[in-house]
Amino acid sequence: MELSSWLPIIGWTIPAMGWYVANKQANERELRKEVRSEVEDVIELVDKILESLKEYLALDGSNDKALGLALEIRYLFKRLDTLIHILTERERYSFDEFTTTKLLNMNEVVIESSKFFELCTGGDFGDIDKQSLEANDLVSTWLRASLPAHELINKLHGQFITAFK
């Protein structure tokens, strides 16, 4: 066969390959934006939990506001678990191999989330007896709870960076 008979095929092959590469890059960029948005949602939620915990610990005794904050913190933790689960289930589609793989390894993030929950709530607000805590103990309780929160955020950022390098 002559080269001239291959020209129409080559003419179609080059744009098809260009479309494939451009589509793959666009999909990866869109996935990165979606995951970054979900990571930012987790960070905002962790910040809100810490703010609510600080307000909860500052209240005197047991009252309706304390109960409301305790319920809010429980809800925020359930929301945090949901967001982490969504990130855990994220998959990346491989166009080359036509397979999917987990995007993020969230094992360490889940461990830090559990530590964060335990230190913030004492399991279910059962171990935090605010009447017996002095002002310094309230601050140290909040500080102890904020450490795993920061670790959770660091691990989450680490997984994001690993997934999209």
Image: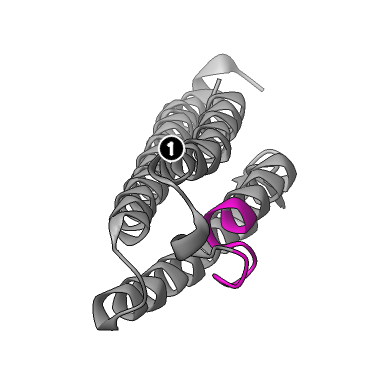
Q: Residue 65, position in %: x, y?
A: 25, 76
Quarter of the picture holding the C terminus: top right
* Residue 125 placement, left or right of 58: right
Q: Quadrant of residue 72?
A: bottom left
| Between 156 and 129, the one nearer to me in the picture | 129
Taking the spot 46% from the left edge, 62% from the top edge, the residue there is 130
Quadrant, the N terminus: top right
* 89 to 4, vertically: above or below: below
| Apparent side of residue 91 relative to residue 12 in the rendered image (left or right) | right
Q: Is residue 20 above or below residue 125?
A: above
What residue is rendered at 46% in x and 72% in y?
A: 74
Question: Residue 44, position in %: x, y?
Answer: 32, 47
x, y (%) of residue 33?
A: 35, 40
Of the pair 142 and 94, the residue shown nearer to us:
142
49 relative to 140 in the view: left or right = left
**Span of residues in magenta:** 117-127
Q: Is residue 115 visible?
A: yes
The residue pinned by badge 1 equals 136
Identify the residue shown where x is 49% and y is 37%: 140
Work out whether residue 12 or residue 127 is closer to the camera in this orientation and state it.
127
* Outermost residue, bottom side: 64
Residue 32 appears in which quarter of the rendering? top left
Res 83 seen here: no
Secondary structure state at the residue bearing disc 1: helix
Q: Residues within 10 Å of mark 1 (few under 14, many from 20)?
A: few
